[in-house]
Amino acid sequence: MTEKFFIEPLFSNFIASDILDVDCDKIVEYIKTVEPGLPLNLNEPAIHDVIDEVHNSIPEFMKIYGLGLESRPRVTTCWANRNNASEPLKPHLHGTHWISAVFYPEADEESPDLVLKNPITVRNEACNASFASRNS
């Protein structure tokens, strides 16, 4: 092939982090009242500070990545995973969203590491686990 071609990453990902000055105890108390597996109520005052922090960060994210502000992304879904202190979070996808935010109200130095994987790898692992459980 004599023509030059342009190579660009197909699965470009990024991560940003921040420490939020919010009332984590209030958030944890609310999370304990929510049935596991159900989304959190976006109108719940206990989580408003976190949602506001995410909304306030979006314009900077949009600017850094050259995206127009006219799309005005907003938090549309919010849920909680409750694990034991030593239990790692199971691999999962945020497949229907192009921006995801994660907040750990009780994380500390003793918490398990956050592990981020290529979405294709996670999808394959989930499919294999689902197939194995149906065939055992």
Image (spheres, grey):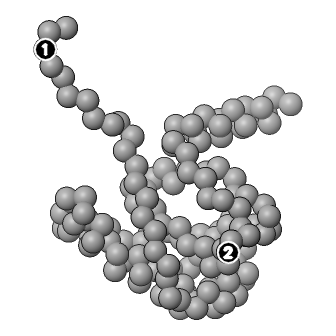
> What element does badge 1 sit on?
loop
Q: Is residue 103 above or below residue 16?
A: below
Give whichever of 17, 47 is nearer the camera. 17
Q: Earlier in the sequence, mark 1 or mark 2?
A: 1
Residue depth check, mark 1 versus mark 2: number of the one nearer the observer: 2
- Residue 109 position by quadrant: bottom right
Left or right, 58 with reference to 53: left
Answer yes or no: is residue 23 visible. yes
Quarter of the image with the C terminus is top right
**Residue type at mark 2?**
Asp
Q: Which residue is drawn at 67% across and 67% down?
A: 81
Q: Most extreme residue toward the front, as rendered?
A: 109
Give whichever of 130, 65 is nearer the camera. 65
The residue carrying pointer 1 sits among few (fewer than 14), some (14 to 19) or many (20 or more) residues within 10 Å by Cα, namely few
Q: Disc 1 marks which residue?
A: 3
Give whichever of 80, 10 is nearer the camera. 10
Q: In this view, does 131 lie above or below 4?
A: below
> What element does badge 2 sit on?
loop
The residue carrying pointer 2 sits among few (fewer than 14), some (14 to 19) or many (20 or more) residues within 10 Å by Cα, namely few
Q: Is residue 87 above or below residue 49?
A: above
Looking at the picture, how far across and down is residue 76, in whole percent?
Answer: 44, 69
Q: Which mark is residue 108?
A: 2
